[in-house]
Amino acid sequence: MLLAFSLAGTPAAAQAPAPAPQASAAAAAPAPSTAAAVPAAPASAKKNGDAVDNPYGLEALWKGSDAIARFVLILLAVMSVGSWYIMIVKLLEQSKMNRHARTVDKQFWAAPTVSAGVTGLEKNSAYRFIAEAGVQATSDHGGLKSHIPMNEWIPMSITGAVDRVHATTQGGLAFLATVGSTSPFVGLFGTVWGIYHALTAIGISGQASIDKVAGPVGEALIMTAIGLAVAIPAVLGYNWLARRNKAVMDEVREFSEELNAVIVGSAGKAA
């Protein structure tokens, strides 16, 4: 009987370790799922890399704004382009007048008469325009004008020509002054309008968290920044061009006074 029990227990003991390979196989089974999960990281990284659009930039401001906000942006853009155009054009005009002044010093005063000196000046020169006005005044002194003394009529004609030149040099400066003084308020209007719509949207949604407030309010404040960016160059350009205009007109007035002295002093014969 003891031998029978021993023989019967030996197979059971031998069969007991058998489930171990199955357990090891079961433990090894999840390995493929782990390996399959590895490529998921690049996929999520690619998804995050695709989201490169700035939700708080100018593009978002334009797409999310209404007709009034877009009109304000377009108006500020027109003001900026107009200001830079005027500044460049006026700078070129002033440089040309300075070049014409050097031509007058070299050629005009060396001529025997005013008429001969005029031919040596550029056609579009302000100095030529003033000199021609002085020459024309000597021959256009008839009719009712003959009652005006020659020594008064010639200065009147030359002064009128100088005033027209001065008006030409002032052209465009009023636009710069207007842009410099109004564009900050235009930008501020856009900011107020944008904040109003942002607060309205927040009130409707019922969410006032920082992520809901920062975007709309930040986009509205961009309007103020754009208004200042338009105003500052316009103000600086106006002051700079006005100072250069004064220097240019001082030379023009000096030329007109000398021209008047030559024509009046010669009783019109030097014309």
Image (cartoon, rainbow, N blue to C red):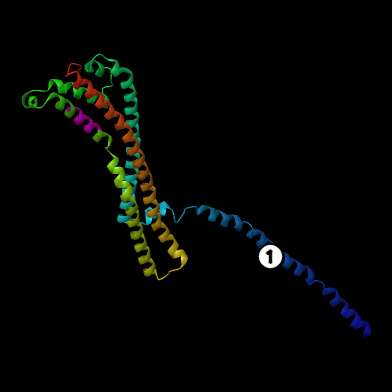
Q: Position of residue 28 (x, y in %)?
A: 73, 64
Task: Please say whether residue 231 is visible from this viewpoint.
Answer: yes
Q: Position of residue 11 (x, y in %)?
A: 86, 76
Toward which corner of the image does residue 224 lie, by quadrant?
bottom left
Q: Residue at x 44, y 65 (%)?
A: 212
Q: Quadrant of the C terminus?
A: top left
**Front residue of this view, candidates 215 and 78:** 78
Toward which corner of the image does residue 164 lie, by quadrant?
top left
Residue type for callout 1: Pro
Q: Position of residue 92 (x, y in %)?
A: 34, 31
Q: Main secondary structure of the magenta part?
A: helix
**Front residue of this view, candidates 51 and 148:** 148
Q: Position of residue 103 (x, y in %)?
A: 32, 21
**Front residue of this view, candidates 46 and 114:** 114
Whether residue 197 is in magenta: the answer is no
Residue tagged by mark 1? Answer: 30
Crowd band around label 1 with a 10 angstrom C-alpha radius: few (<14), some (14–19), many (20+): few
Magenta span of residues: 157-165
Left/right placement of residue 12 relative to residue 209 reads right
Q: Residue at x 91, y 82 (%)?
A: 4
